[in-house]
Amino acid sequence: MTETLFLADEDVADLADPADYVDAVREGYRQRGEGAPAKPRTKLLNESPPGMFTAYAAVLPETGAMGGYMYSAGFEERDAWFVTPLFDATTGEPLAIVDGARMNPFKTGAVGAVGVDALAREDANTLAVIGSGAQARGQLRATATVRDLDTVWVYSPTKEHRESFAAEMNERLDASVAAVASSAAAVEEADVVVTATKASEPVFDGENLADGAHVTAMGQYDPNKRELDAATIERSVYVPDLRERATQDAGSFIQAIEEGVVTPDHVHAELGEVVAGHATGRESPEDVTVFDSGGTGIETAAAAYMLYERAVERGRGTEIEFAPASEALTGE
């Protein structure tokens, strides 16, 4: 038998802050840039009741861990459950099973922030956030750890939601955070734009982007999800989390191809290649850059292992046992 740690929500709730997640995820993408294996998500749809079952994984050899998410969303309960299996990348043994719901907006925000750090101008200090949910909160809190933000504008269609978001973030951040009445008002003077939505149509006009702006789009996980218009994709130095995913489920990029404004060769590099120094990111202050984030096992495994290490240090979690196949299959 092999002892494995089960980490419940309360075990991981206070183990890390946004900067910790950013550091772990940046290291994961550096390893991806050096050749660490990762694949885009596999998504299975159920018709009745309607729901989605999704899985993705990555191996981080230098960290010594491999893992990812398996999660369900929708179905009759209209909710989501995130299970994170984590394995030792040397022995193959299971290290932990993590309740991954708590870390979800933090690890997703972290990869967005790594994209900002790799591609936005060093002097970027104004930020637009489109969206006001948990993912938008995670994106903003993480991005504030990689750039010295002065001003943040937030837009979402519901006035009460964007105003509540602005009030909360004003308490959390040193930057001035204000709700605005349109996406155009948020975007037009922003150095960095973060979209954190479930939109199926573009959430801002790409012509409103200032020269030199960076865009991190995190709602790009389905061919029918489209936060960015073709104009934004066309004028951008376009960097996805995984090159393979760009033509599989990155809705804005797929739509731009279908509209004939770009070809698959418009992919400049993967984020990991930029982080590892094997590809350039921004080449001039006037470049418009896009990081297309759809979710991978890279940030999931990196964040989960960081939480696992800290849980072990603090004596948290519940030990459970797994039978190796050699014993279970033979009955010995």
Image: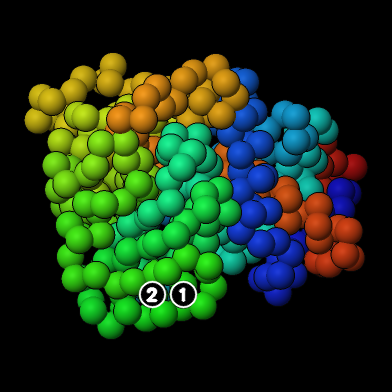
Q: Establish if 71 lies above or below 255.
A: below
- Residue corresponding to mark 1: 170
Identify the amino acid type marked 1: Asn
Q: Relative to residue 72, is residue 102 drawn left or right? A: right
Q: In the image, residue 88 lies at what x, y percent?
A: 78, 39
Asked if residue 58 shows in the view, the reply is: no
Q: Establish if 13 lies above or below 66.
A: below
Name the residue located 37 percent from the left edge and 81 percent from the top edge.
164
Name the residue located 46 percent from the left edge and 72 percent from the top edge.
169
Q: Establish if 281 lies above or below 212.
A: above
| Residue 222, quarter of picture | top left
Name the residue located 68 percent from the left edge and 70 percent from the top edge.
13
Q: Nearer the viewer, residue 57 or 208?
A: 208
Q: Which mark is residue 166?
A: 2
Q: Badge 2: how crowded within 10 Å, few (<14), some, or many (20+)?
A: many
Q: Secondary structure at mark 1?
A: helix
| Residue 61, quarter of picture | top right
Q: In the image, residue 85 lies at what x, y percent?
A: 66, 50
Identify the amino acid type marked 2: Ala
Asked if residue 132 shows in the view, the reply is: yes
Asked if marks 2 and 1 touch (Cβ < 8 Å), the reply is yes
Q: In the image, residue 228 lies at what x, y percent?
A: 22, 44
Q: Quadrant of the C terminus?
A: top right
Q: Nearer the viewer, residue 232 or 61?
A: 232
Q: Secondary structure at mark 2?
A: helix
